[in-house]
Image (cartoon, rainbow, N blue to C red):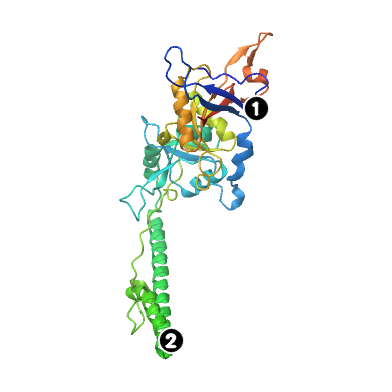
Amino acid sequence: MPIGPARPGKAKTEAQIRVVLGAHNGTSSPKRPTEYNLFELEDVGEKTSRKGIMTAQDGVPTPDLPFPVFQISQKVQRYLLYNIKTVTWLRRTHNILGVLIGSLPQSPQQNVFLGLPLELQPEEVRLLVEEGIAYIADDLKSHQIALRSLPNQLEEYKAGLRKEGLAAARAVEGKKQQRTQEALQRLSIRQSTPDVDNTANEDSRHNDEGDREDRLFDAPQTRTSTRDPTDLIPYSSTPTTSYPPLSPPPQQSSLPLPEVNSPSYALFKHLHSRGYFLSPGLRFGCQFLVYPGDPLRFHSHFLATSVEWDEEIDLLDLVGGGRLGTGVKKGWLIGGVEKKFESDSGENEPDSQRMGNGDENAQGGNVRTFCIEWGGM
């Protein structure tokens, strides 16, 4: 079944199609027809997608543009970002999510919560490069060149890291001493106040249980901690980026653009231009999960899959996609670049222009999207 446009006059209204399923016995009609709702997405993104978008005015500093996106392999398209400020800025101003793939230093033996670096999808990298926001750099080559030309500032950089670690250790030690003083003051107040009745005794026992955790890890109650601050062991600090002391790789050494599937990238760019957030959709059997706002605040609304305009779609795929999307409380979205037809004047004219709708894509064609939902039994 090709992705055809809606019937004339129905371009901006919801059109229903009836998919009849059931076993035929030759003469009897199908049993329990199944109804789907098919509607074309036109202004949905403009109406709903701006809810979760935050701008640079929210206090997120803008990084130096364009910034490097590091490709870690010449044979495999994997692109990483290591700077948390850049990751935050992209998420809040350009709706770029990526996937965190690094382990947490405090909990390295689990994979439920992950941290830096952030791996970007090829479609995300290509979009950033085309818009002049980023450029692709060879991770290994840029580090080797930068290390060979590193000035004699490495020791100063290490000394700065030790200074930051020592300041953090002093802050923690100061909080410990403050908690110890507060616990001793509460204990002295309780000891100087006589018990009036059994209720006061019971309250005192509850207070003792509440303060037991504080006294367990604090200094002895008979004296305060007099530890010399110079004896503190500096906390180790592991920077997530190499800049400084290294200099970012030059933009002239940018690698070629990522190779992406043309319909997939066209659909990604179309939905992204409408303000949606897109993440990989492998776990839901699609190409992209489409969110109306930041995924930290919203659930996804669509399971997006790209197809060619004249590509035949099996009926079982329509049924399976519609049932899957509705089963997880989402819509199954299909879309692609519209094919141009030759008009009466001899010029190539997109079919959506004849219908009066469509969104012009950078590749020259209009991107059309349709959503299929399970309507009921």
- Is residue 59 left or right of 24 when viewed as pictured? right
Q: Say which of 160 and 309 sits in front.
A: 309
Residue drawn at the location 43% of the way across and 38% of the way down: 70
Up/down of 86 relative to 129, above or below: below
Can you see residue 295? yes
Q: Say which of 105 and 152 sits in front.
A: 105
Mark carried by residue 259:
none
Three-letter code, disc 2: Ile
- Callout 2 secondary element: helix
Give the image location of residue 92, x and y in percent. 55, 46
> Pointer 1: what residue?
13
- Is residue 11 left or right of 181 when viewed as pictured? right
Give the image location of residue 115, x and y in percent. 40, 48
- Is residue 347 left or right of 18 when viewed as pictured? right
Residue drawn at the location 54% of the way across and 20% of the way down: 3
Can you see residue 259? no
Three-letter code, disc 1: Thr
- Callout 1 secondary element: loop
Residue drawn at the location 60% of the way across and 44% of the way down: 51
> Pointer 2: what residue?
189
Residue drawn at the location 55% of the way across and 31% of the way down: 269
Quarter residue 50 falls in: top right
- Is residue 214 left or right of 4 when viewed as pictured? left
Q: CA distance from mark 2 to mark 1?
A: 74 Å
